[in-house]
């Protein structure tokens, strides 16, 4: 096993629990944001099998980091899937391939932004140092040589399908939790943070706050 | 007709914001980057802008830096700006407050609620 494909037995129980909580939150966020972005109600999370592979994929990747935690979220798709999803939201719009890819970039932005916000809300309660987090813009590129899907899955690298009546989207997350950083940043509070992440409920309603009114 | 400027590098986000606004009430313009927004505001067309909806995470110039630049322009010191972003940390909101932005819209937004808020801010009847 390489550094980015560790199984639960290779990690300390508490860190394995942390990986699982982040993985679950990412999967739920990806599903919820796709429902919100497209209006398709019957989207479900499914495990990925080798039969789900396709060779005409594009990939969009976004990264976020906060004390002790790095998350890389990707979605892999064909232009047809991107077009089908974009048409759900903009049925009357004349779409270019770029419009469709851009639609999925914004979807990734909403997904990773949602994870970042969840962690930004939860971490300051438990973290002993400034908890400023970083996020990269979505980057999309052809993925012919990029997607070597290991369907065995691990806690650190995980793939899943977001599936609906007429199609599916492959998502993946690479998690890197630095145990030393985590222990120093959240000294004594890791269990509480895991509990908070495990019970986090995805919220798609957004918020409007006016200052000083 | 009230003039609104949408600033977001994502064409999807710009389209969603535009469709949330009633185009019978508003004249909506778009900019895909900070430099493009500054150029628009410096032009004759931009001077009558009454409200800005601005993203934060954009290449070339981030939204808060852009808003600081806009607020430094004498014609736009009091121009209401709403940040529309996936960012919702207290630190970021405090930075926005310091710059003088009027409010914070966290994506994904409710288009009906956003339209009602904008109607109220620009003083346009909701009917």
Image (cartoon, helix red, strand yellow):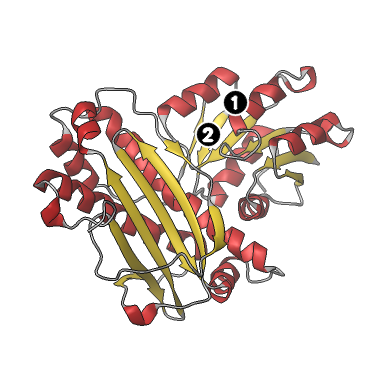
Please state the horizontal and vertical placement of residue A103, each as a whole percent of the image: 58, 60
Residue B78 visible somewhere in the drawing: no
Circle 2 residues within 10 Å: few <14, some 14–19, many ≥20: many
The numbered mark 1 sits on a residue in which chain?
B
Question: At 54% across and 52% down in the image, what residue appears?
Answer: A139
Q: Which residue lies under the disc numbered 2?
A: B104
Circle 1 residues within 10 Å: few <14, some 14–19, many ≥20: many
The numbered mark 2 sits on a residue in which chain?
B
Distance from disc 1 to disc 2, alpha carbons, whole Å, reads 8 Å
The number of numbered badges drawn on the structure is: 2
Please state the horizontal and vertical placement of residue A142, each as a whole percent of the image: 56, 65
> Does residue A167 appear to the left or right of B1 in the view shown?
left
Question: At 32% across and 39% down in the image, what residue appears?
Answer: A119
Q: Looking at the image, do the residues carrying marks 1 and 2 touch, with CB atoms under 8 Å apart?
A: yes
Q: Is residue A31 shown above or below B90? A: below
Task: State the residue in front, A154 or B34.
Answer: A154
Q: Quadrant of residue B30?
A: top right
Task: State the residue in front, A10 or A167.
Answer: A10
Please state the horizontal and vertical placement of residue A26, each as a whole percent of the image: 33, 54
Question: At 46% across and 59% down in the image, what residue appears?
Answer: A36
Q: Which residue lies under the disc numbered 1?
A: B101
Residue B7 visible somewhere in the drawing: yes
Residue A29, numbered label: none
> Does residue A140 appear to the left or right of A133 in the view shown?
right
Which corner quadrant holds the N terminus of chain B? Answer: top right
Which residue, as the protein is rendered here, is positioned at the far front?
A: A2
Q: Is residue A71 shown above or below B82? A: below
SS class of the residue under badge 1? loop
> Does residue A86 appear to the left or right of A62 in the view shown?
right
Question: At 15% across and 49% down in the image, what residue appears?
Answer: A17
Task: State the residue in front, A169 or A60.
Answer: A60
Q: Are marks 1 and 2 on the same chain?
A: yes
């Amino acid at each position: 096993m390489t550094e980015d494909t560790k199984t639960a037995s290779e990690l300390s129980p508490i860190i394995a629990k942390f990986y699982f909580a982040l993985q679950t939150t990412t999967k739920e966020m990806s599903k919820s944001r796709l429902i919100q972005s497209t209006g398709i109600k019957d989207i479900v999370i499914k495990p990925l099998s080798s039969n789900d592979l396709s060779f005409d994929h594009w990939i969009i990747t976004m990264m976020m980091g906060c004390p002790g935690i790095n998350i890389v979220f990707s979605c892999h798709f064909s232009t047809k899937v991107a077009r089908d999803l974009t048409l759900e939201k903009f049925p009357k719009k004349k779409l270019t391939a770029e419009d469709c890819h851009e639609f999925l970039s914004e979807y990734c932005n909403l997904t990773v932004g949602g994870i970042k916000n969840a962690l930004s809300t939860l971490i300051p309660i438990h973290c002993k140092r400034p908890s400023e987090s970083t996020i990269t813009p979505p980057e999309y590129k052809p993925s012919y040589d990029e997607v070597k899907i290991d369907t065995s899955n691990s806690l650190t690298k995980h793939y899943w399908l977001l599936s609906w009546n007429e199609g599916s989207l492959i998502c993946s997350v690479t998690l890197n939790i630095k145990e030393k950083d985590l222990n120093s940043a959240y000294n004594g509070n890791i269990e509480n943070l895991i509990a908070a992440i495990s019970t986090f409920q995805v919220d798609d309603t957004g918020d409007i706050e006016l200052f000083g009114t | 007709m009230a003039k609104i400027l949408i600033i977001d590098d994502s064409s999807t986000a710009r389209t969603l914001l535009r469709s949330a606004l009633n185009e019978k009430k508003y004249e909506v313009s778009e900019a895909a980057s900070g430099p493009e927004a500054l150029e628009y505001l410096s032009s004759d067309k931009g001077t009558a802008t009454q409200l800005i909806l601005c993203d934060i995470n954009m290449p070339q110039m981030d939204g808060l830096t852009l808003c600081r630049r806009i607020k430094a322009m004498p014609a736009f010191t009091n121009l209401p700006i709403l940040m529309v972003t996936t960012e919702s940390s207290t630190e970021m909101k405090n930075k926005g407050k310091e710059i003088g932005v009027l409010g914070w819209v966290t994506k994904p937004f409710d288009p009906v609620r956003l339209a009602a808020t904008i109607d109220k801010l620009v003083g346009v009847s909701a009917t």
